[in-house]
Image (cartoon, rainbow, N blue to C red):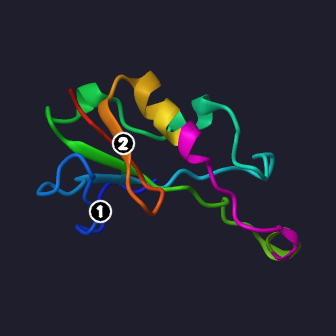
Amino acid sequence: MSSAGPKNLVPPLSRDAPAEVVVTPVLDDEWPADGLGPVEPVMAQIPAPSTLPAKTWVAVLPGEAPPGRGLSRLLRRGEKRAHLAVRCGALLAHGYSNVCADKHGTAFAQVP
Protein backbone atom coordinates (compact mmCIF):
# COMPACT_ATOMS: atom_id res chain seq x y z
CA MET A 1 0.00 0.00 0.00
CA SER A 2 1.30 3.44 -0.82
CA SER A 3 0.25 6.48 1.16
CA ALA A 4 0.92 9.17 -1.39
CA GLY A 5 0.67 9.02 -5.11
CA PRO A 6 0.81 10.85 -8.37
CA LYS A 7 -1.01 14.14 -8.49
CA ASN A 8 -2.68 13.20 -11.79
CA LEU A 9 -5.28 11.03 -10.02
CA VAL A 10 -8.22 13.43 -9.89
CA PRO A 11 -11.64 12.10 -8.86
CA PRO A 12 -14.46 12.77 -11.34
CA LEU A 13 -16.53 14.36 -8.56
CA SER A 14 -13.77 16.88 -7.81
CA ARG A 15 -12.13 18.19 -10.94
CA ASP A 16 -9.74 20.44 -9.01
CA ALA A 17 -8.58 18.35 -6.00
CA PRO A 18 -6.36 15.33 -6.67
CA ALA A 19 -6.35 12.28 -4.44
CA GLU A 20 -4.01 12.85 -1.52
CA VAL A 21 -3.79 9.18 -0.59
CA VAL A 22 -3.27 6.42 -3.17
CA VAL A 23 -3.65 2.79 -2.15
CA THR A 24 -2.45 -0.13 -4.25
CA PRO A 25 -3.75 -3.24 -2.50
CA VAL A 26 -1.45 -6.24 -2.34
CA LEU A 27 -3.45 -9.34 -3.21
CA ASP A 28 -2.34 -12.86 -2.32
CA ASP A 29 -2.09 -15.84 -4.65
CA GLU A 30 -5.56 -17.01 -3.59
CA TRP A 31 -7.21 -13.89 -5.00
CA PRO A 32 -9.78 -14.89 -7.69
CA ALA A 33 -8.73 -14.38 -11.30
CA ASP A 34 -11.95 -12.46 -12.05
CA GLY A 35 -11.08 -9.92 -9.32
CA LEU A 36 -14.33 -10.51 -7.40
CA GLY A 37 -12.87 -11.43 -4.03
CA PRO A 38 -13.94 -10.47 -0.52
CA VAL A 39 -14.01 -6.81 0.48
CA GLU A 40 -12.20 -7.30 3.80
CA PRO A 41 -8.61 -7.82 2.51
CA VAL A 42 -8.85 -4.65 0.41
CA MET A 43 -10.57 -2.69 3.18
CA ALA A 44 -7.80 -3.64 5.62
CA GLN A 45 -5.26 -1.85 3.40
CA ILE A 46 -7.24 1.41 3.15
CA PRO A 47 -6.69 3.92 5.98
CA ALA A 48 -9.66 4.53 8.24
CA PRO A 49 -11.38 7.84 7.42
CA SER A 50 -10.91 8.91 11.05
CA THR A 51 -7.14 8.98 10.49
CA LEU A 52 -7.36 11.52 7.66
CA PRO A 53 -8.48 15.15 7.48
CA ALA A 54 -12.07 15.81 6.40
CA LYS A 55 -12.63 16.11 2.63
CA THR A 56 -9.42 14.19 1.79
CA TRP A 57 -9.74 12.20 -1.43
CA VAL A 58 -8.46 8.62 -1.48
CA ALA A 59 -7.76 6.61 -4.65
CA VAL A 60 -7.65 2.81 -4.74
CA LEU A 61 -5.89 1.21 -7.70
CA PRO A 62 -6.67 -2.34 -8.89
CA GLY A 63 -3.82 -3.95 -6.94
CA GLU A 64 -0.72 -6.01 -7.33
CA ALA A 65 0.52 -9.45 -6.42
CA PRO A 66 2.80 -9.78 -3.41
CA PRO A 67 6.49 -9.87 -4.26
CA GLY A 68 7.61 -13.43 -4.86
CA ARG A 69 10.91 -15.16 -4.76
CA GLY A 70 12.47 -17.55 -7.20
CA LEU A 71 10.23 -20.05 -8.93
CA SER A 72 6.98 -18.83 -7.34
CA ARG A 73 7.45 -15.45 -8.98
CA LEU A 74 8.06 -17.03 -12.37
CA LEU A 75 5.05 -19.35 -12.12
CA ARG A 76 2.59 -16.64 -11.12
CA ARG A 77 -0.03 -16.19 -13.80
CA GLY A 78 -1.20 -12.69 -14.62
CA GLU A 79 -1.63 -9.73 -12.37
CA LYS A 80 -3.79 -9.85 -9.27
CA ARG A 81 -6.43 -7.16 -9.51
CA ALA A 82 -9.38 -6.28 -7.31
CA HIS A 83 -12.52 -5.60 -9.31
CA LEU A 84 -13.80 -2.03 -9.22
CA ALA A 85 -16.92 -3.17 -7.36
CA VAL A 86 -14.78 -4.71 -4.60
CA ARG A 87 -12.69 -1.55 -4.22
CA CYS A 88 -15.76 0.72 -4.14
CA GLY A 89 -17.43 -1.65 -1.69
CA ALA A 90 -14.36 -1.53 0.55
CA LEU A 91 -14.44 2.28 0.56
CA LEU A 92 -18.16 2.32 1.38
CA ALA A 93 -17.77 -0.30 4.11
CA HIS A 94 -14.98 1.78 5.63
CA GLY A 95 -17.28 4.81 5.88
CA TYR A 96 -16.06 6.99 3.01
CA SER A 97 -18.47 9.17 1.02
CA ASN A 98 -18.67 10.37 -2.59
CA VAL A 99 -17.51 7.01 -3.94
CA CYS A 100 -16.87 7.19 -7.68
CA ALA A 101 -14.54 5.93 -10.41
CA ASP A 102 -12.74 7.43 -13.36
CA LYS A 103 -12.68 6.11 -16.93
CA HIS A 104 -9.45 4.21 -16.16
CA GLY A 105 -11.08 2.17 -13.39
CA THR A 106 -9.54 3.90 -10.40
CA ALA A 107 -11.87 3.95 -7.38
CA PHE A 108 -12.12 7.22 -5.43
CA ALA A 109 -13.82 8.26 -2.23
CA GLN A 110 -13.76 11.21 0.14
CA VAL A 111 -13.46 11.43 3.90
CA PRO A 112 -16.82 12.74 5.20
Is residue 89 on the magenta stretch? no
Tag 1 near tag 2, CB within 8 Å: no
Q: Dividing the picture into quarters, in which one does residue 92 lie? A: top left
Return the residue found at the far front: 103
Disc 2 crowd, CA 10 A, few/some/many (<14, 14-19, 20+): some
Q: Is residue 103 left or right of residue 69?
A: left
Residue 111's place in the image compared with 108, above or below, is: above
* Quarter assignment of residue 48: top left
Q: Amino acid at mark 2?
A: Cys
The residue sitting at 60% across, 36% down in the picture is 41
User: Which segment is the magenta one?
Assistant: 74-86
- Mark 1 is on which residue type? Leu
The secondary element bearing badge 1 is classed as loop
Q: Nearer the viewer, residue 2 or 79?
A: 79
Q: Nearer the viewer, residue 51 or 23?
A: 23
Q: Main secondary structure of the magenta part?
A: loop
Looking at the image, residue 17 sits to the left or right of residue 51; the answer is: left
Q: Nearer the viewer, mark 1 or mark 2?
A: 2
Q: Which mark is residue 34?
A: none
Q: Which residue is mark 2?
A: 100
For the residues labelled 1 and 2, the Cα–Cα distance comes to 12 Å
Q: Which residue is mark 1?
A: 9
Q: Quadrant of residue 70?
A: bottom right
